[in-house]
Image (cartoon, rainbow, N blue to C red):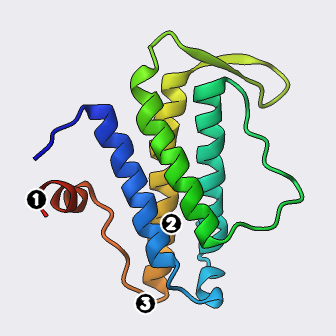
Amino acid sequence: MKLVDTLTTLYSHNLWANLRLLERCAELTDEQLDATILGSYGSIRETLEHIVKAERSYLSRISTGKMYQHPEDASPMTIEEMTEAARETGAGFIEWAPKVQAEDTVELDSDGTPIDVPKTIILTQVINHATEHRAQILAILTELGIESPDLQSWKYFDEMYTG
C-alpha cells in the first residue's frame, strides 16, 4: 500500500469521486440527464457542468490568481468533455494544493469590492462544493430508481489501497 500525504489524498478522492459519478452518468439517457428534484442545483447534466466549470475557476485562481473565463457562447459540455476537464483540474489540484501556503491570497471581486481571500479557503471550497453537488446528483439518481455509485472515502480506500 502506497501512503500519500493528506492533501494528495483529499484531492485524489475528489477527482476519483467526480470521475466515478461522470462514468455512471455517461450511461444515462438524455431524459435522465435532464432530470432534477426540488432542492438541487438543477438537472444532473447542469449540475455536473457546474461542478466542472467551478473547479476550472478555482484552479485558475489557485494557480494563476486570475478568474477562468468560460466562453459565454459555448455549447453545453458533453459528458466526455466534462470528464476530460475533471481529469485536468483534478490533477491540477493534486499538484497545487500542497504548494499553497497559509499566507497565500487571491483577490476576488464578487460585488464590486475587491477582497483578498486566502487560497486555503478556495481549496476548502473545492471539496465542499463538489461534495454538496455530487450528493444532489446522487439524490436525483435515487429518485429515478438508478443505483448510485458509492463515492465514500471507504470505497475509495478499498479500490485504491486494498483492491
| Residue at 33% over, 63% down | 151
Element type where label 2 sits in the image: helix
Residue identifier under label 3: 145
Instruction: Please state which amino acid type lies under the numbered disc 2.
Output: Gln
Front-most of residues 39 and 69? 69
Is residue 118 visible to us here?
yes
Q: Earlier in the sequence, mark 3 or mark 2?
A: 2
Give the CA distance from mark 3 to mark 1. Answer: 30 Å
Instruction: Please state which amino acid type lies under the numbered disc 1.
Output: Thr
Front-most of residues 145 and 107? 107
Residue identifier under label 2: 136
Left/right placement of residue 43 relative to residue 70 reads: left
Q: Position of residue 90 (x, y in %)?
A: 47, 46
Quadrant including the C terminus: bottom left
Residue identifier under label 1: 162
Is residue 43 visible to us here?
no
Instruction: Please state which amino acid type lies under the numbered disc 3.
Output: Gly
| Residue at 83% over, 60% down | 74
